[in-house]
Image (tube, rainbow, N blue to C red):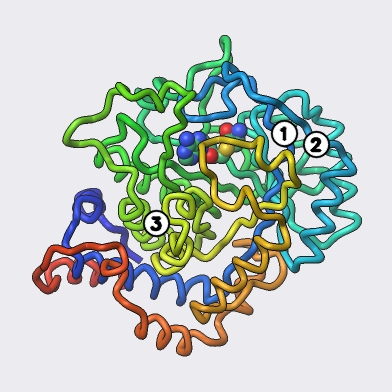
Amino acid sequence: MQRLTHEEILGWLRETRPAALDQLFAQADQVRRERVGDAVHLRGLVEISNYCVRQCHYCGLRAARSTPRYRMNREEIVACAHKAVELGFGTLVMQAGEDFGIEAEWLAGVIRQIKSETPLAITLSLGERLLDEARLWRQAGADRYLVRFETSDPELYAAIHPLRGAAISDRVELLRELRKMGYEIGSGVMAGIPGQTYEILARDIELFAELDLDMIGIGPFIAHPETPLGAPDVATAGEDQVPNSELMVLKAVALTRLVCPEANMPATTALATINTVDGREHGLESGANVFMPILTPSPYRQMYQIYPGKACVDEDATQCNQCLRGRIQRLNRSVGEGQGGRRSGGGEAAFGNASQSAAATKARQPLSDELGQKESSQPAEETLSQFVVLR
Ligand code: SAH
């Protein structure tokens, strides 16, 4: 399969004509159906600690912010794992701030216990921990590691992700090392961070393909008022600034599906936060095939404020599960069975009712209508022809 060129990706990111965009979303949806099927995999997310040593300029968990902190204990985490099984999820994602109070041996014990008591795949999302720690967790049974590189642009990265002392911070290199350890690797970016240009976002998408990522999460940047990037006078890239809009996220998701056809891609909680009504559905219709329902118990759930207004914080795990399953069903998609890894099965079960869902997709309104794209446009033959190289 041939790749979209840099110029083509850039052109699509800047595209505004609704008819052209509907072709893009339809194409991404078709590639998603053919390559990873109709199943939507559910990954239960447990936010195990909100302590953080870092000062990321976008994140509400940054060390400098004075906010109540918590760290879940072993019993609480294992209880979430059993809840995940009860709700029919195939994966448990343990996420946290970069918290060295999560001691490596201790977490290895938690991982071993969950792996011995449940059939779950385990994904870690704990920031930039030491390679030896990641190795230990892999040996204990962890299957996947998520660490978003946040931006492929070194200058923007340095500006939003300050170094911690003398330690180097190279998330791309970390991803490569994690893959060598046998992890499935996941990464991603936010769309619309101040300073992010269209060029940069296009290169981010190309880097996803270059790294051959197994999982890719893309959500909108949501300003947190108590962080540097949430300041009212924050510097942007002017005319080249990527907006943090739903439409921009959907374009990035769709293009990513085209260049990384086999990746597992969530319709993110951040996307659901900027469109609580049907942001998740739009994600699933533009190339995504994963939901990440939050399992974190109260009161911790409300304390894990990476950005304000996070969707679902007022629900509990059971309500989240029911809501998400309803959304999947209404799109005529199925819920994924098993662990749903890229390399370890789960996807195959998905191919059963592709034609049924193709019909369902056709019956829906074009996405651009739902997004309120009002301007009229020409039929998009010339843009469609860009896809010919893909097929
Ligand atoms: N400490 C871990 C987990 C961070 S939270 C790590 O650094 O990898 C997971 C993701 O949330 C981050 O990688 C970032 O892309 C996203 N995020 C952080 N702040 C955000 C904000 N203000 N708006 C939208 N997404 C945000």
Image location of residue 39, percent across then percent down: 58, 74
Residue that carries the numbered disc 3 in the rendered image: 253
The quarter of the displayed image where residue 20 is located: bottom left
Q: Is residue 148 visible?
A: no
Residue that carries the numbered disc 2 in the rendered image: 72
Q: Amino acid at mark 3?
A: Val
Give the residue displayed 23% in from the left and 56% down from the top.
12
User: For mark 3, does the 10 Å Cα neighbourhood hold few (<14), some (14 to 19), or many (20 or more) residues?
Assistant: many
Camera-nearest residue between 383 and 322: 322
- Of mark 2 and mark 1, the one earlier in the sequence is 1
Q: Is residue 226 visible?
A: yes
What secondary structure is marked by label 2? loop
Q: Amino acid at mark 2?
A: Met
- Do tag 1 and tag 3 residues touch (Cβ < 8 Å)? no
Give the residue displayed 76% in from the left and 43% down from the top.
138
What secondary structure is marked by label 3? helix
User: For mark 1, does the 10 Å Cα neighbourhood hold few (<14), some (14 to 19), or many (20 or more) residues?
Assistant: many
Mark nearest the camera among 3 and 2 is 2
Q: Along the horizontal axis of the image, is 196 left or right of 101?
A: left
Give the residue displayed 29% in from the left and 42% down from the top.
243
- Do tag 2 and tag 1 residues touch (Cβ < 8 Å)? yes
Q: Quadrant of the N terminus?
A: bottom left
Q: Amino acid at mark 1?
A: Ser
Image location of residue 156, percent across then percent down: 36, 26
Label 1, ligand 1: CB separation under 8 Å: no
In this rendering, is residue 383 above or below 71?
below
- Residue at the far front in the pictured view: 314
Camera-nearest residue between 253 and 304: 304
Camera-nearest residue between 114 and 371: 371
Q: Mark 1 to mark 3: distance in Å? A: 28 Å
Image location of residue 363, percent across then percent down: 36, 85
User: For mark 2, does the 10 Å Cα neighbourhood hold few (<14), some (14 to 19), or many (20 or more) residues?
Assistant: some
